[in-house]
Image: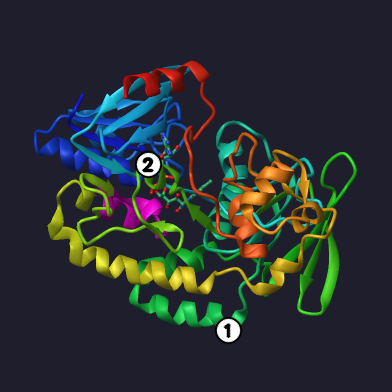
């Protein structure tokens, strides 16, 4: 294989594949999920883009994870169910998406405390929430979308706690006048108890979460619940791009107006190039595959994305939520107290094994950056756990 390779079959990767395949190029799309669709269109979702992909000439390879790569040789190492294969590309489009930002607080590791998108994904995969009381908290429009989805599945949404203040939300609503469809969508999702300037201070319970302690200004109270869905927006998945030597700035892959990264023949589209939502991801995917006529449209979509990121940026008070005994690195059970005995990511990794577990710092890294201001350590292969023999094989090919 040496045509156009796309990593990620979410909206950005699908749009890139459909556009690239139209030009007659040889196209292959890899995604580590069992089905295409990415975060938003998972679990059997069907729409015009997914149909266009299935009707296109693009080859789709699912359950296939890129664990390493070499930009100089224009190769990637793909792990499919434990079997590794090296593939080459003439042009690479990275559309690796984003994950949720979790900021630790006492009790955040209790069973039934989950991410906002994470709980939605579990429900889409079959978890029954009918009759369950759910507190949805954190920041961003995803809280509204997910609460509405959970309600349709029969859950009782006790409340939505949005950390952003009323003033910045009001300014956001006014600016939405330039995006009337988004304004209508947001208004339709607003529930009865949408508390602004409000966040979870602690999750409480013995076997699993039973209630949360909430704060809104000086008011502090407890709310009973069966599940908590909590996240503070999204963090771009930049690890593969960084491994390939692409410049990463302010937490996202740096691209030019054609979505080209700082490395020749490598492009990036969607959330990994800037958190902007599904419309932006679709436009960027098409532009990365050559549809440069869409650039003016992208400009407008990006102004909305900038507005979103400003409005829902986590507030400084959230840095004080974790207590000395609060676990920050869930994989290796590293508490804030143990982290404070070190002075950088590197020494926390070396002395406390922070970020050395299965998630390789994807969850605790952004949290620690927010709480302690430490820059993440450089990315090393493998990006995900893989068999040792696969890495030996890759190195012997070089
Ligand atoms: C948990 C979660 C839930 C969300 N739910 C919603 C929602 O309900 N509504 C909404 O409007 N927005 C939602 N979003 C925001 C959503 O991510 C974007 O709007 C949109 O899906 C972005 O598209 P994308 O193509 O950039 O990324 P994604 O849809 O995230 O697609 C990226 C794909 O790349 C794959 N991938 C990443 N790295 C590799 C690798 N190394 N090898 C192989 N495959 C790889 C991922 O598994 C994923 O399938 C959610 C985000 C998250 C994180």
Magenta-colored stretch includes residue 284: yes
The answer to whether residue 155 is visible is no
Query: Which residues make up the magenta segment?
Result: 268-285
Q: In which quarter of the image is ligand 1?
A: top left
Residue 47, compared with residue 215, is above or below; it is above
Q: In this figure, what is the number of numbered marks? A: 2
Depth check: 184 or 1 in front? 1
Depth check: 249 or 218 in front? 249
The residue depicted at 69 percent of the width and 67 percent of the height is 193
Residue 262, compared with residue 166, is above or below; it is above
Would you name the residue on which mark 1 appears?
167
Decide if residue 55 is on the left or right side of residue 145.
Answer: left
Decide if residue 307 is on the left or right side of residue 371.
Answer: left
SS at mark 2 in the image: loop
Disc 2 under 8 Å from ligand 1? The reply is yes
Q: In the drawing, what numbered circle is on residue 340?
A: none
Would you name the residue on which mark 2 appears?
10
């Amino acid at each position: 294989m040496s045509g156009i390779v796309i990593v990620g079959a979410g909206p950005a990767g699908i749009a890139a594949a459909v556009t690239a395949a139209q030009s007659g190029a040889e196209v292959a799309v890899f995604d580590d999920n069992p089905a295409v669709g990415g975060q938003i269109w998972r679990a059997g979702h069907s729409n015009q883009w997914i149909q266009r992909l299935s009707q296109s000439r693009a080859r789709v390879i699912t359950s296939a994870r890129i664990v390493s790569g070499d930009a100089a040789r224009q190769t990637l190492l793909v792990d499919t169910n434990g079997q590794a294969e090296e593939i080459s590309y003439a042009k690479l489009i990275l559309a690796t998406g984003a994950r949720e930002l979790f900021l630790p607080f006492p009790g955040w590791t209790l069973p039934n405390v989950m991410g906002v998108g994470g709980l939605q994904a579990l429900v889409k995969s079959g978890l029954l929430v009918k009759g369950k009381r759910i507190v949805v908290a954190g920041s961003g429009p995803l809280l509204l979308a997910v609460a509405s989805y959970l309600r349709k599945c029969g859950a009782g949404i006790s409340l939505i706690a949005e950390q952003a203040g009323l003033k910045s939300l009001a300014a956001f609503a006014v600016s939405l006048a330039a995006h009337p469809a988004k304004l209508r969508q947001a208004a339709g999702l607003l529930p009865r108890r949408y508390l602004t300037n409000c966040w979870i201070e602690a999750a409480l319970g013995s076997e699993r979460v039973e209630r949360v302690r909430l704060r809104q200004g000086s008011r502090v109270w407890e709310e009973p619940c069966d599940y908590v869905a909590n996240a503070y927006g999204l963090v771009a998945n930049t690890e593969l791009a960084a491994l390939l030597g692409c410049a990463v700035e302010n937490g996202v892959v740096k691209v030019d107006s054609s979505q080209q990264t700082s490395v020749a023949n490598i492009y990036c589209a969607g959330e990994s190039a800037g958190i902007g939502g599904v419309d932006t991801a679709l436009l960027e995917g098409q532009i990365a595959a050559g549809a440069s006529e869409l650039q003016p449209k992208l400009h407008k979509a990006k102004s909305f994305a900038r507005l979103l990121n400003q409005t829902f940026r986590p507030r400084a008070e959230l840095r004080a939520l974790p207590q000395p005994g609060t676990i920050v690195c869930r994989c290796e059970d590293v508490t804030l107290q143990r982290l404070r005995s070190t002075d950088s990511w590197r020494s926390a990794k070396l002395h406390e094994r922070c970020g050395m577990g299965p998630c390789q710092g994807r969850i605790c890294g952004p949290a620690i950056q927010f709480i302690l201001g430490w820059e993440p350590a450089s990315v090393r292969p493998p990006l995900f756990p893989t068999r040792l023999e696969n890495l030996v094989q890759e190195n012997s090919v070089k």
